[in-house]
Image: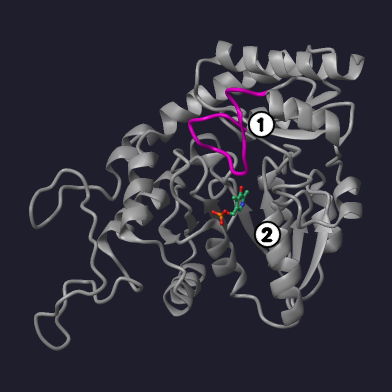
């Protein structure tokens, strides 16, 4: 079955006891046994819950993986993958990472004697050079946050597998509608389902998908052992959201590409990062690796913090907020919001400057979005003329 059909039906057959067409919210902590050693597949909701099972099966299907696991947040999903590392192990991570992933690597895993090297993810050879005998895992995001650099998943997987290193891809920005890392050779996909998968900015959640039984067994063990599981209501909302992932993504991509073009031609914008622009240095890779170019657009204003602040305050449709991937448009200031955990020196080295603004382009009418951005840029122009 095709993607759109699986999003609506995978893992979501009629309820076996009542025939309910929509998977019910199994709001129960525990399950009654028929006798010793006799239960119907569920014992306790940390270990397993039928609403969660439906979401886990659906996400596995969309990512073309064998196994899915849902978590209480994207970070709980990241942690479930990293939890397999032992003291002395080494991770090679692409830089330009989600701030929280950088933070858990540096502040949680490094003190547990897991070492991490950061490489420029745009260069697959950089992974080859950073791999050591004790390297266990490569960690990549593509497109990256917030600069929308791309990592060639197939090339990195080939290099890493030749050296016995597993590859995890955070597919939050692209979603399985645009990019399927497992099919490109990755071993593990991680999601913050908070973003496009749920798509309505009303749930925090995460997921891990893999086809490797060993990785699955370890992550499933950790899910139950550490207990970072989502509530039945949250997974139900996420399941409701994911049904429309394809139609939402098509509109996100179409709107974002219009926004990127508009900003690229605007005289008050210093530069625009969007994989769909022919000027993006990795546009060819984006066309090869992704079905379309996504809903995130990052721009840089020539001024500093005060100009960025004026721009953000002047927006009326875009809200100034962290997060992304919801139906409504958001603008975020990475330096003080999503990427505040990264030391300034490191941040500037990566090109995240005082003029950098990240847009999560929603699915409102695109003319309203362009008018809003135009109005805010005019306000910045008037401000700097004063
Ligand atoms: C938001 C995000 C995370 C963390 O997910 P939470 O649901 O906020 O815990 C991880 N990776 C990326 C790329 C994200 O955008």
- Give whichever of discs 1 and 2 has the lower sequence position: 2
Q: Dot 1 lies on which element?
A: strand
State the image coordinates of residue 195 (x, y, percent, origin top left).
52, 43
Q: Mark 1 points at which residue?
A: 359
For disc 2, does the CB lie below 8 Å from ligand 1? yes
Q: Measured from the top left, where is residue 164 in percent x and y?
A: 69, 67
Res 268 visible: no
The percent position of residue 128, horizontal first and vertical second, equals 82, 58
Q: Residue 278 bears which disc, if any?
A: none
Q: Splitting the image into 4 quarters, where does residue 92 fall?
A: bottom right
Q: Does residue 345 appear left or right of residue 136 in this picture?
A: right
Magenta stretch bounds: 315-330
Question: Viewer-proximal residue, 283 or 321?
Answer: 321
Residue depicted at 9% across the width and 80% down the height? 34
| Residue at which label 2 appears | 101
109 versus 169 height, above or below: below
Secondary structure at badge 2 equals: helix
Whether tag 1 and tag 2 are in contact, CB under 8 A, the answer is no
- The mark closer to the camera, 1 or 2, is 1
Q: In which quarter of the image is the N terminus?
A: top left
- What kind of colouring is applied to the model shown? one colour
Query: Along the horizontal axis of the image, is 379 left or right of 143?
Result: right
Label 2 crowding class (10 Å Cα cut-off): few <14, some 14-19, many 20+?
Answer: some
Disc 1 residue crowd, few under 14, some 14–19, many 20+, Cα 10 Å: many
Q: Residue at x 72, y 37 (%)?
A: 148
Instruction: Say whether residue 251 is magenta.
Output: no
**For residue 370, side relative to residue 352 (left or right):** left
In the rendered image, residue 323 lying in the magenta stretch gets the answer: yes
User: Which residue is most to the bottom?
Assistant: 36
């Amino acid at each position: 079955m095709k993607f759109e059909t699986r999003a609506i039906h995978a893992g979501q057959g009629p309820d076996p006891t009542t025939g309910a067409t929509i998977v019910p919210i199994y709001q129960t902590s525990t399950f009654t046994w028929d006798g010793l050693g006799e239960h119907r597949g569920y014992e306790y909701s940390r270990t397993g819950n039928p609403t969660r099972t439906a979401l886990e099966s659906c996400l596995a299907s969309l990512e073309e993986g064998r196994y899915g696991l849902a978590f209480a947040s994207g970070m709980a999903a990241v942690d479930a993958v990293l939890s397999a590392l032992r003291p002395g192990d080494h991770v090679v991570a692409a830089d330009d990472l989600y701030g929280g992933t950088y933070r858990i690597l540096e502040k949680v895993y490094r003190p547990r004697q897991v070492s991490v090297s950061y490489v420029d993810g745009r260069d697959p050879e950089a992974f080859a050079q950073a791999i050591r005998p004790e390297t266990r895992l490569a960690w990549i995001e593509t497109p990256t946050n917030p600069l929308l650099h791309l990592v060639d998943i197939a090339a990195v997987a080939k290099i890493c597998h030749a050296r016995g290193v597993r590859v995890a891809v955070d597919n939050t920005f692209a979603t399985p509608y645009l990019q399927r890392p497992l099919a490109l050779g990755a071993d593990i996909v991680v999601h913050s389902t908070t973003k496009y998968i749920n798509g309505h900015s009303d749930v925090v959640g995460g997921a891990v998908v893999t086809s490797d039984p060993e990785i699955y067994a370890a992550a499933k063990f950790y899910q139950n052992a550490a207990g970072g599981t989502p509530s039945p209501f949250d997974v139900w909302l996420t399941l409701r959201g994911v049904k429309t992932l394809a139609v939402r993504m098509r509109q996100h991509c179409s709107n974002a590409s219009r926004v990127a073009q508009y900003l690229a031609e605007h005289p008050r914008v210093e530069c625009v990062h969007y994989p769909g622009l022919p000027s993006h240095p990795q546009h060819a890779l984006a066309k090869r690796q992704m079905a379309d170019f996504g809903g995130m657009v990052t721009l840089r204003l020539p001024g500093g913090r005060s100009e960025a602040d004026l721009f953000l305050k002047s927006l009326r449709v875009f809200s100034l907020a962290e997060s992304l991937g919801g139906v409504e448009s958001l603008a975020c200031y990475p330096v003080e919001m999503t990427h505040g955990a990264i030391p300034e020196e490191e941040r500037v080295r990566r090109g995240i400057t005082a003029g950098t603004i990240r847009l999560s382009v929603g699915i409102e009418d695109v003319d309203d979005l362009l008018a809003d951005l135009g109005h805010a840029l005019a306000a910045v122009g008037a401000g700097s003329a004063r």
